[in-house]
Amino acid sequence: MKQPSQYTAVRGKTYSILISKKAVLVIIALLLAVIAIMVLSTGIGSVYISPWQVVRSIFGFGDAANEMIVRSLRLPRIIVAVLVGAALAVSGALLQGIIRNPLASPDSIGITGGATLGAVIYFYFFGEQISIHLLPVFAIIGAFIVSLIVYSLAWKQGVTPLRLILIGIGFSAAMSSLTYMMMISGPIILANQSMTFMTGSVYGVSWAKSVLPLLPWVAVLLPLVLVYSRHINIQELGEDVARSMGSAVQRQRFILLLFSVALAGAAAAFGGAIGFIGLMAPHIARKLVGPSFGALIPASALMGAIVLLVADLTGRTILSPLDIPAGVFTACIGAPFFVYLLYRSRNR
């Protein structure tokens, strides 16, 4: 008697993704968790709003005061937290797949450092003259330039994963040094602006300045990543095996790296240098859904959103009325997690 299949296929005209049925259930559970935390977080603040009233206010059926608080003040912050967390997590998942190293993340490879340096350059030279809308442009350009330099230096008849991550770690340290040098040599307002950005926070966002500019990046890149990431499943078998199966390893690796840079750069532009989400979320998602990237990408995105939502909620409430940047709490969790990964891989 034929056993029922444990997998389900998602097919399009030019692609096919195989996902286990267990992973589908986990992804649905994570999605429901994201929605629940979004509603709960939107209601918590100096004025408490019940979850039912939050839902009514979102759809325009609440009273005027609640609708103003929910739709104008709190909901943009919650949506930006979801988008930034998802983008950082998927960026980290891609890097860990490309480099085949569990310690790979936008922070360790220099992407976040490049975005931060780009933002500080903006603050240093143009902070008082040019519209704040140009800040994301500088951050994304910084991330791309640093990534291209790292990739070029790592190229030696192809890019080997170990060489790429070692050069990335070195460049990340160099970017931090340049950033602090500019902060010290500039006016005091530069230090204040830069420290807020470097800590990482979704405070003070709005629909026009944050949600609407960031949404297209995530909405376009995540589906592209989901379709293209199937190449990583082949590459994890080894470069020789991947080439024998007709995979253009270097070209695919470079394209996936560009996707990762674009996601991390966009996230850093609107949320600052929020650390460790790109490291933690993919590992947690991998434990839940397995290593196949057809399930790992959406699971990582949802897990990244959960991590940042919880960090932001904690920062807003733990010492209220003080608003502690979410990056402080992701670092408090992520640093021990990084040490744990180092300890676990010490004999590998």
Image (cartoon, helix red, strand yellow):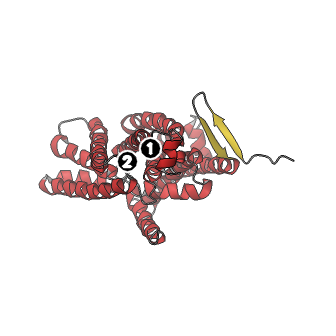
Q: Give the distance between the C-alpha atoms of the residues marked 2 and 1, in whole angstroms.
A: 8 Å
Left or right, 241 with respect to 330, comes to right
> Residue tagged by mark 1?
80
Label 2 close to label 1 by CB (< 8 Å): yes
Q: Inspect this view and state whether residue 19 appears.
A: yes
Tell which residue pokes out farthest to the top in this image: 13
Q: Looking at the picture, which amino acid does disc 1 mark?
A: Val
**Residue 166 location, x and y as percent?**
32, 58
Whether 139 is drawn above or below 185: the answer is above
Residue count near mark 2 (Cα–Cα under 10 Å), binned few <14, some 14–19, many ≥20? many
Q: Where residue 276 sits in the image (x, y, percent)?
A: 41, 58
In the picture, the disc for residue 63 is none
Q: Position of residue 134 (x, y in %)?
A: 27, 36
* Image label count: 2
Q: Position of residue 18 (x, y in %)?
A: 64, 42
Amino acid, disc 2: Gly
**Depth order, front residue of 17/84:** 17
Front-most of residues 309 and 231: 231
The local secondary structure at tag 2 comes to: helix
In the depicted view, which residue is nearer to us: 147 or 200?
147
| Residue assigned mark 2 | 271
Bin the neighbour count of mark 1 within 10 Å (Cα to Cα): few under 14, some 14-19, many 20 and up. many
Which mark is first along the chain, 1 or 2?
A: 1
